[in-house]
Image (spheres, grey):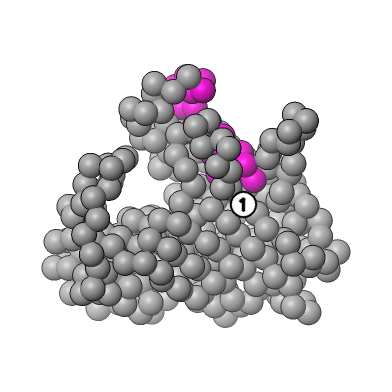
Amino acid sequence: MKQYLALCQRIIDSGEWVENKRTGKRCLTVINADLTYDVGANAFPLITTRKSYWKAAIAELLGYLRGYDSAAQFRAIGCNTWNANANENEAWLSNPHRQGEDDMGRVYGVQGRRWQRPDGSTLDQLRKIVDDLSKGVDDRGEILTFYNPGEFDMGCLRPCMHTHTFSLLGDTLYLTSSQRSCDVPLGLNFNQIQVFTLLALIAQITGHKAGQAYHKIVNAHIYEDQLELMRDVQLKREPFELPRLTINPDIKTLEDIETWVTLDDFEVEGYQYHDPIQYPFSV
């Protein structure tokens, strides 16, 4: 919480205004932010100065790990964050690659599970990482990337959180997650939850202890229509202690994640929070 609040205050104190062409809104912006989450100690980075809907964030992560390409698939597991980008993004609605209602195209998990090779075959990046780590192998390239510039026109949104690098030291697994752009009032809490949960899950199914997760953000911003709520409401609140995340220990393989895992397999204990804040969302 202290890291999160410090970043919010930094943006307000020293950020510069930038016009965002995609949304048509101004953003108060800083460059470079580094956050660290102690996954081994189970200090779950859930925002407490407003109510956070953590289940949707974990549902979205599950969809990424499964390679989902439809907003309908995400809705079915409890996540509505892709409805607008799939069905209300004007540029995507007129894109010839769009396959109809709810189609997201080749974004995020599609790249992670079915990266297209020149010969037409596909590469499952996540499968390779899980297989290596399960054998105790770290080739310094245990990298899951969703960022494929050659196919940006084939999806409704470029990935914001784009690359996850796993590092194995002895029996402890670490994660470095890189994000090009971050809507701090809305998106960052989702991103924090997903970075933490991704390391916890992959450590569990590969048989390792979880260490720390390092979250690196390039462009961190607060939209102009979010600024007042952040400055005058959320930053005035006193944070509570961080809760803990419990993951069903029966989740033991990537196939488990792909097939039967649901939100019922995740539980947050000791979550205290202030009232919700309805920040505007920019498509």
Residue placed at 50% from the left, 68% from the top? 215
Toward the right, the furthest residue is 135
Query: Which of the 4 image quarters holds residue 177?
Result: bottom right
Q: Above or below — where is 260 with respect to 188?
A: above
Residue type, mark 1 in image: Thr
Residue 255 coordinates in the image, percent (x, y): 74, 46
Q: Residue at x 41, y 69 (%)?
A: 32
Please state, as top left, top right, bottom left or bottom right, where the C terminus lies in the image.
Answer: top left
Total numbered labels: 1
Neighbours of disc 1 within 10 Å: few (<14), some (14-19), many (20+): many
The percent coordinates of residue 70 (x first, y second) are: 52, 31
Q: Main secondary structure of the magenta part?
A: loop
In this rendering, the answer to whether 62 lies above or below 208 is above
Quadrant hosting residue 89: top left
Residue 39 versus residue 87 in the image, above or below: below
Is residue 84 visible from the viewing direction of this image? yes
Asked whether, in this view, residue 117 is left or right of residue 198, the answer is: right
Range covered by the magenta-colored residues = 97-112
Which part of the image, by quadrant, shows the N terminus?
bottom left
Residue sitting at x 67%, y 49% = 257
Q: Is residue 102 magenta?
A: yes
Whether residue 145 sits left or right of residue 2 in the image: it is: right
Residue under pointer 1 = 145
Q: Residue at x 63, y 77 (%)?
A: 211
Expressed as whole percent of the image width and height from the top left, the position of residue 82 reads 43, 38
Give the image quarter of residue 109: top right
Can residue 73 be seen here? The reply is no
In percent of width and height, residue 76 lies at: 51, 35
Q: Secondary structure at mark 1?
A: strand
Q: In the image, is residue 222 part of the stretch drawn in magenta? A: no
Q: Nearer the viewer, residue 252 or 38?
A: 38
